[in-house]
Structure formats: structure tokens, C-alpha cells
Image (cartoon, helix red, strand yellow):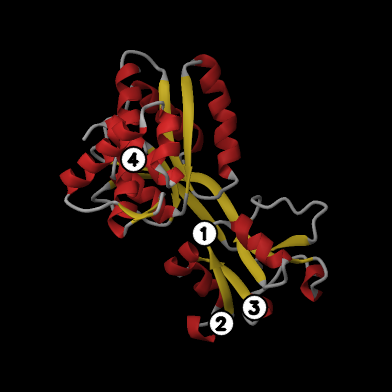
Amino acid sequence: MDMETLENFLVIARENNVTRAAQIIHITQPTLSRQLKALEEELGRPLFYRENRRLSLTPEGILFRKRAEELLDLYRKTRSEIRASAEIAGDIFLGTGETDVIRLISQVAVGFSRQHPGIRYRIFSSDAEGVRERLNKGLLDLGLVYGPSDPEKFASVPLDQEDRWGILLPRTHPLAAEPGLSPEQVRDLPLILSQQALKSGLLLKWLGKPLEELNIIGTYTLLTNAAKMVAGGLGCAMGLDGLINTAGSPLCFRPCDPSLTDRLSLIWKKDHQFSPAVQAFQELLLQNFAEK
């Protein structure tokens, strides 16, 4: 098994057809079929169901697709690091949740890129759990996350920027006229809540009600999707300020009162070997944003 085999397998998995995949890869269909057969024999399990000329992934195929994507990501990242090992150039892999702080970091990155034109930023968007998982596998260099991270695995530095929580609701909602919303006003609404903040207990503490007494109509990992649910009339979403542009939209954002804030941390895997580019960028972020 080599990188080419993994890449070809992913094309077959995407196209669900060996003939179309062979045309895309520019090899013959029999050659690609033999390669797939040899891969399945090596793994000892079929990766596809065969139905006439259409293929669909078996459970083992679904797992192998995920691992193949991760292996190729790690290979490309390692290749980039080796090529850039003698200079400040190459790829910086940054994982982050939804936060307006990324706008400030981008402003710093502009100057860094002007100084080092060979830099490229690879951004992976997920919740904290997803970012930590990819950091742990070596697929990311740095992560921006809310909440604590395992100190045995990750180094962590709190950033001095705070994000403010509030409620997204329709402009026609009776509470839209309020400048800020209290727990008493919010806790009985049909709520759409962040899965991550729900797990951490941050929102439950502010709402002042146990989970089973709240009317949680849905949960989200990306506030952009939650905003569409609010616009569709499903409920009201608690989220961070600055992520949804409500100007000219049917939605409005009202901050929590008393104020509820959250703070990001920059984290990285303790045994991760930084390239010169990542090392320089990490130092720049800490210089500009580390909590004083």
C-alpha cells in the first residue's frame, strides 16, 4: 500500500464507479480494478459492495476512507515541513472553532505573510473536540479552543481576547426590543445550544436551570447552521457575538445580561516538532494575544 493507492481509492469512493475513476486518474480501468482487488486482499475485507456497475462503501470501506484521508493529510503535511525545514516557508495547519478572534489573528497573519511570502495557512474548522483529535494525530500544528485541554497531551496558553455570549432571535420576537437578556427571560424559550458549551456546563450555569427543565429544541456545532434554524422559526440560539452578521437580516443578537464571556486558548501537542514557519508564527501569536 502506498500514497498513490490511497489517492486512487479515494477517487473510486467519490465516484462510486471504477471506470469513471480510471478516466479521472488517467489509467486503464483493468489496472485500477486490479489495484483495488490487491488492496482488499491486503486488508482482508471488501471495501465496496458491487451492484451492477455501481459501487458503495462497506462499513470497512467507510472506516478505510477516513483513515486514508488522514494518512494523506499527514503525508502532505510532513512533506511540506521537510521542504520548508531550512527556511520560514510552507504550510501552517491551524484548527479553530467559530470565533471572531480569527479576524484579529488574520490581521497579524497578513504582516507575517508579507515578511515570509512562502507561507500558506491551512485552516480546519471544528469544535474543540475535533481540533484536539486532529492535533493529537499530528494533522494540525496549532489549535484555538474553548475550555480545558488535557495537560498531559497539550500545552495551552490562554489568549487575552474574550468572546461575548448572547442570543440570536428573530427581530419580530417580543424580546428583540430588549438591550440585553437575562437568564429569567431566556431559560423558558425554545433553545438551540452549542454542543460544546452544553457539555462544559457554561450555559447551564448562566441559565440557572438543570438540563431536564430546559426546552432545548436543538444543538449545533456551527452557529451559521443554528442561525438558519432560528430564521426558520425553530427557536432562539445562544451563540458568540461577531459570528453572524445580522445587519439587514431578519435576526438580531442580544447579549447576555449579566455578561457571559468565554476565552480562547492556543494549544499544541506537547511532543509535536514545529517547522521553522510554525515556530515563528506561534511566537508571533503569543506575542500579540497571550494573556498578560
- Per the image, label 1 sits on a secondary structure element best described as loop
Q: Amino acid at mark 2?
A: Leu
- The reply to whether discs 3 and 1 touch (Cβ–Cβ < 8 Å) is no
Foreground pick, 139 / 2: 2
Return the residue found at the far front: 52
Q: Please state the horizontal and vertical placement of residue 85, each as a whole percent of the image.
A: 31, 18
- The reply to whether discs 4 and 1 touch (Cβ–Cβ < 8 Å) is no
Which residue lies under the disc numbered 1? 221
Marks 2 and 1, the one that precedes in the sequence:
2
Give the quadrant of the N terminus: top left
Which residue lies under the disc numbered 4? 9
Which residue lies under the disc numbered 3? 190
Marks 3 and 2, the one that precedes in the sequence:
3
How would you rate the neighbour count of disc 1 (Cα within 10 Å): few for under 14, some for 14-19, many for 20 or more? some
Residue depth check, mark 4 versus mark 3: number of the one nearer the observer: 4
Residue depth check, mark 2 versus mark 4: number of the one nearer the observer: 4
Residue 268 badge: none
Q: Amino acid at mark 4?
A: Phe
Foreground pick, 282 / 69: 69
- The reply to whether discs 2 and 4 touch (Cβ–Cβ < 8 Å) is no
Q: Residue drawn at (51%, 44%), measured in percent from left and top?
A: 160
Which residue lies under the disc numbered 2? 214
